Structures are given as structure tokens and as C-alpha cells.
Amino acid sequence: MPKTIIHTLQAPQAIGTYSQAIKIDHTVYLSGQIPLDPVTMTLIGNDIRAQIIQVFMNLQAVCEAAGGDLSDIVKLNVYLTDLTHFPIVNEIMADFFSEPYPARAAIGVAALPKGAQIEVDGIMILEEQEYH
């Protein structure tokens, strides 16, 4: 089955040997996004709320480049350097997602790239009419 590399300038460019996302048939595998400003490629400060918002904005940009949006995400993995911030993730997710919410895991990690406090990756399923 052919795979399509998803790339957009509206999200941070890959800082390693990976693609922003890969589409296979109707499934899009979204690489982890950290709170980098896509223009400057710098971390959005130390405020956890700002970092969470930026991560979801970055994910939204990649979803749009793949022909979908956040509502098409069926699975999210949330990585936090401090799990006490998880209630803030829930609060901000309510601004970006509506029911039915995606399946989700929350994982505490010791560190993330560039000193980020959060990283989120996911899987998106596109409806047949959205697939190009």
C-alpha cells in the first residue's frame, strides 16, 4: 500500500529523521508535536498552558495538511514531564476537541526534546470522501 508523506510549513519542521505525518489509505499517523513556534522553531516559553495550546495548534496544522482536522483523531498519546499538569491538558483539550473524544493515553516522562513539558502524537482516520 503506498504511503504519502504529509508536510506543512504551518507546523514545526521535523528536527530529526521523521516526517510530520504519514498517510496510508485512510489512516494518518501523526508524529509527536512539541510546543515549537513553526516560524521561529523555538519553544513557546515555560508556561504549561501556552505549551499545551501550541501543541494542539501544531497538531491541527498537520491534520489539515493531511486533509482532516482534530475531530478525525481517534487516538492520542500525551507525554508530560509533570503529570500534575494533566488536568490542564483536559481543560485545554475541551477547547480543541468535542465528543466523541479520541482514545487517549497519558504518560509521564523524564524529559522531552528541546526542554518541552508536553508532547502529543496521534492517529487520524479520514472519511472516504476526504481522502485524496
Image: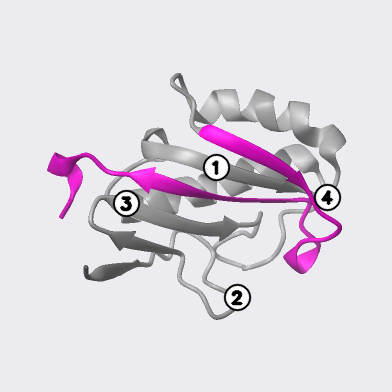
Q: Secondary structure at mark 1?
A: strand
Q: Residue at x 69, y 33 (%)?
A: 89
Q: Amino acid at mark 1?
A: Leu
Task: Give the residue at mark 4.
Answer: 81
First-in-chain label (1 vs 4): 1
* Residue found 22% across the figure and 39% down from its top: 127
> Crowding near pointer 3: few (<14 within 10 Å), some, many (20+)?
some
Tag 3 or tag 2, which sits nearer the N-term? 2
Give the Cα distance between marks 1 and 3: 14 Å
| In the image, residue 17 above or below residue 35 | below
Q: Is residue 115 magenta?
A: yes
Is 120 displayed left or right of 99 in the figure? right
Q: Nearer the viewer, residue 61 or 128?
A: 128
Magenta region: which residues? 103-132
Closer to the camera in the image, 91 or 104: 104
Position in image of residue 43 (x %, y %): 72, 60
Label 1 and label 2: CA atoms lie apart by: 21 Å
Q: Which mark is residue 85?
A: none
Query: Tag 4's secondary structure?
Result: loop
The numbered mark, 4 or 3, whose residue comes first in the sequence reads 3
Q: Foreground mark, 2 or 3? A: 3
**Label 1 neighbour load within 10 Å: few <14, some 14-19, many 20+:** some
The residue most toward the top is 99
* In this rendering, position of residue 34 left or right of residue 14: right
Disc 2, SS: loop
Question: What kind of residue is marked 2?
Answer: Ile
What amino acid type should be assigned to the residue bearing mark 4?
A: Thr
Residue on which disc 1 sits: 76
Which mark identifies residue 15?
A: 2
